[in-house]
């Protein structure tokens, strides 16, 4: 079982898609990593040798910010926006959409369940 950056990669998937299970690595990053290490995209995760897994791990540690560090950085960035009182920070604080979406009819994911007003 390949364990990289604290994540168990799915055994049966191709390596290029298996690496995307790591927070902070998408398909493009995954392919760049595999090119740098010299591993075929078609190889399955369970077919990787220990040396190949170690090389992938080394490449990710050297050139990418992933998992816990990246989550911490994103949280700190959002906290900074909130503390500065920037418009985006206010939207985060109020739990509303941050990127300019309309809120009259949509935005239920950010706003939560409907709260009935005035119904007695």
Image (tube, rainbow, N blue to C red):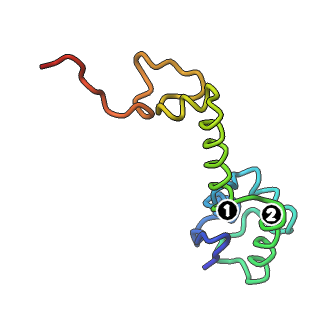
Q: Quadrant of residue 62?
A: bottom right
In terms of depth relative to the viewer, which is nearer, 115 or 53?
A: 115
Quarter of the picture containing the N terminus is bottom right
103, above or below 29, in the image: above
Residue displayed at 71% across by 69% down: 43
Residue 33 lies, in percent from the top left, at 80, 61
Q: Is residue 119 above or below residue 47?
A: above
Taking the image as shown, residue 5 lies to the left or right of residue 111, namely: right
**Circle 1 residue:** 19
Q: Please tell me which residue is depicted at 67% across the width and 72% down the height of the picture.
A: 4
- Residue at x-position 76% and y-position 50%: 28
- Mark 1 vs mark 2, CA separation in Å: 10 Å
| Dot 2 crowding, Cα within 10 Å, few <14, some 14–19, many 20+ | some
Asked which secondary structure carries label 2, the reply is helix
Residue highlighted by disc 2:
34
Q: Quadrant of the C terminus?
A: top left
Residue most extreme to the bottom = 50
Describe the element under mark 1 as helix, strand or loop.
helix
Q: Where is residue 113, by image quadrant?
A: top left
Give the number of marks: 2
Q: Residue at x 85, y 61 (%)?
A: 35
Give the class, few, some or many, for how many residues have Cα within 10 Å of label 1's Cα (few <14, many ≥20).
many
Towards the viewer: 55 or 47:
55
Name the one closer to the observer, 47 or 114.
114
Residue 57 is tagged as: none
Q: Of the residues under marks 1 and 2, which one precedes in the sequence?
A: 1
State the residue in front, 118 or 57.
118
Q: Position of residue 80 (x, y in %)?
A: 66, 41
Q: Compared with residue 34, is residue 96 higher up or lower down, i.e. above or below?
A: above
> Could you tell me if the residues under marks 1 and 2 are in contact, i.e. CB atoms within 8 Å?
yes
């Amino acid at each position: 079982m390949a364990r990289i950056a604290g994540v168990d990669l799915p055994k049966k998937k191709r390596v290029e898609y298996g690496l995307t299970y790591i927070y902070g690595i998408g398909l493009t990053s995954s392919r760049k990593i595999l090119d740098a290490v010299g591993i075929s995209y078609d190889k399955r995760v369970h077919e990787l040798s220990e040396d190949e897994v170690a090389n992938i791990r080394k490449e990710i540690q050297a050139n990418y910010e992933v998992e816990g560090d990246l989550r911490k950085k994103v949280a700190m960035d959002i906290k900074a926006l909130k503390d500065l009182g920037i418009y985006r920070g206010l939207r985060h604080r109020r739990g509303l959409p941050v990127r300019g979406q309309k809120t009259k009819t949509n935005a239920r994911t950010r706003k939560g369940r409907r709260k009935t007003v005035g119904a007695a």
